Amino acid sequence: MRRSIFSLALNALTGHRLWRPTWRDAVPKPEYDVIIIGGGGHGLATAHYLANVFGIQRVAVLEKSWIGSGNAGRNTTIIRSNYLLPGNNAFYELSMKLWEGLEQELNYNAMVSQRGIVNLYHSDAQRDAYARRGNSMRLHGVDAELLDRDQVRAMVPFLDFDNARFPVKGGLLQRRAGTARHDAVVWGYAAAASRRGVDIVQNCEVTGFIRNGDAVVGVETTRGSIRAPKIAMAVAGNSSRVAALAGLRLPIESHVLQAFVSEAVKPLIPGVVTFGAGHFYVSQSDKGGLVFGGDIDGYNSYAQRGNLPVVEDVAEGGMALMPMIGRIRLLRSWGGIMDMSMDGSPIIDRSPLPGLYLNAGWCYGGFKAIPGSGFCFAHLIAKGEPHPTAAALRLDRFERGYLLDEKGQGAQPNLH
Ligand SMILES: Cc1cc2nc3c(=O)[nH]c(=O)nc-3n(C[C@H](O)[C@H](O)[C@H](O)COP(=O)(O)OP(=O)(O)OC[C@H]3O[C@@H](n4cnc5c(N)ncnc54)[C@H](O)[C@@H]3O)c2cc1C
């Protein structure tokens, strides 16, 4: 049902008994035009754009658990488009622009909050690298400002500016970056897709592919066989497992990434702050909790939980940056499975098997990409050719040597 000032007022006056479920929990049909595997942000966004922009409504999203139970509901909610390389920056900026109109488009409050992100630099060399990144962003029409130490101090005065090892010398600011409420993004896309007739099928795990020669023409699931001429994978941390069901080996490793939320405190951090001398980033939720994270756990896993050494490592990063964080109590922590690609950039492409499409390799950063990825993946599925802004995100770039190595770290997932 649509939300408006009138529906809010009507429900307020009638005891909130008129609200309808946000989306239909569908029973799978035997056949569709497109099957999307994975009810995370990317799968649901793809379904929304297929149905609402590209006019393909016989679509099913098959989710093995409940929608948003994967990384979409586990991430630290940062959205930004502060990328360096052509191939990445236009794509993430498209996503940023879609975030900016998302709530009106979906008729759903996703709590998109453009509160800004500051990437701190701690040395002259790092300042030069951030100046280069900022210039590249501005050349591509993305907002970027290089801040000196005093400008950063005015924004976030509680940082340890004179830390003996990692003094804060300034930062790269993107004001249009920020946060969004992760599960509301899932619900918003589900609602908009469901309104157009997309079947969202929960508790439906894809266990195999139905083949006609090389072509993929359907899926076997825990709720029976379902056929479609086009099948799209958007299973994030499970990409290598699901691809293996079709006999494919992807340039992707699955790793655990943990996140942490503290007890609620009064407003402290205006936007998102990232430490440049270690892996630590922090923002504050609207409820007051500090939301922070750091490195992946550093071993391959499909378990959605992490281990204590990384908890300690993240806490050390936090203490080096803002020592007063040592006084705060941790409320919750959890883990998600990251689909780490070998150059740190994603893949939106056809697979080598006719009928099977790939959306994977989102590493740490797939939440911010949800609108752009959904739009470009839907474009590829509907029109049979890549959207121009996602044209570089091809699977064969690893074979051809055209890597999108944003951080210049090489094929080392633990460094991306
Ligand atoms: C702790 C943490 C912090 C993060 N922080 C950020 C951040 O601040 N900013 C940012 O941009 N990104 C962040 N990310 C990354 C981001 O969350 C992911 O890249 C993104 O959510 C992945 O896409 P998705 O939402 O589609 O994935 P998911 O939500 O994982 O969706 C994939 C779905 O596929 C389903 N599935 C798997 N196998 C099958 C099968 N066989 N059959 C049917 N369904 C199946 C899963 O159950 C799952 O629901 C973070 C991730 C984590 C874990």
Image: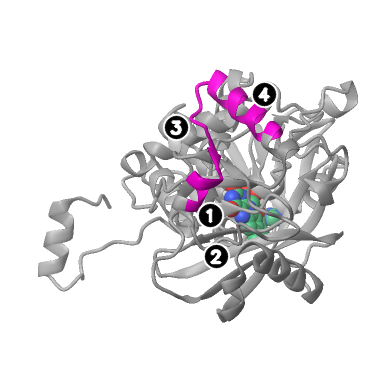
Residue 409, x across and y down, in percent:
84, 39
Q: How many marks?
A: 4
Q: CA distance from mark 4 to mark 1?
A: 23 Å
Q: Residue at x 68, y 65 (%)?
A: 320
Q: Is label 1's Cβ within 8 Å of ligand 1? A: yes
Q: Residue at x 79, y 57 (%)?
A: 255
Q: Is residue 204 above or below residue 306?
A: above
Q: Is residue 300 above or below residue 364?
A: below
Q: Secondary structure at mark 3?
A: helix
* Main secondary structure found in the magenta portion: helix
Disc 3 and disc 1 in contact, CB within 8 angstroms: no
Q: Which residue in the protein does label 3 denote?
A: 97
Q: Secondary structure at mark 2?
A: strand
Q: Which mark is residue 291?
A: 2
Q: Residue at x 64, y 62 (%)?
A: 321
Q: Which residue in the protein does label 1 denote?
A: 77
Tell me which segment is drawn in magenta.
128-153
Q: CA distance from mark 4 to mark 3?
A: 16 Å
Query: Is residue 16 or residue 76 the one in the foreground?
Result: 76
Which comes sooner in the sequence, label 4 or label 3? 4
Q: Which mark is residue 87?
A: 4
> Which of the image's four quarters has the C terminus?
top right
Q: Residues within 10 Å of mark 1 (few under 14, many from 20)?
A: many
Q: CA distance from mark 3 to mark 1?
A: 16 Å
Q: Nearer the viewer, mark 2 or mark 1?
A: 2
Q: Is 143 inside the magenta-drawn segment?
A: yes
Disc 2 and disc 3 in contact, CB within 8 angstroms: no
Instruction: Give the side of residue 145 with respect to residue 406, left or right.
Output: left
Q: CA distance from mark 2 to mark 1?
A: 9 Å
Q: Amino acid at mark 1?
A: Thr
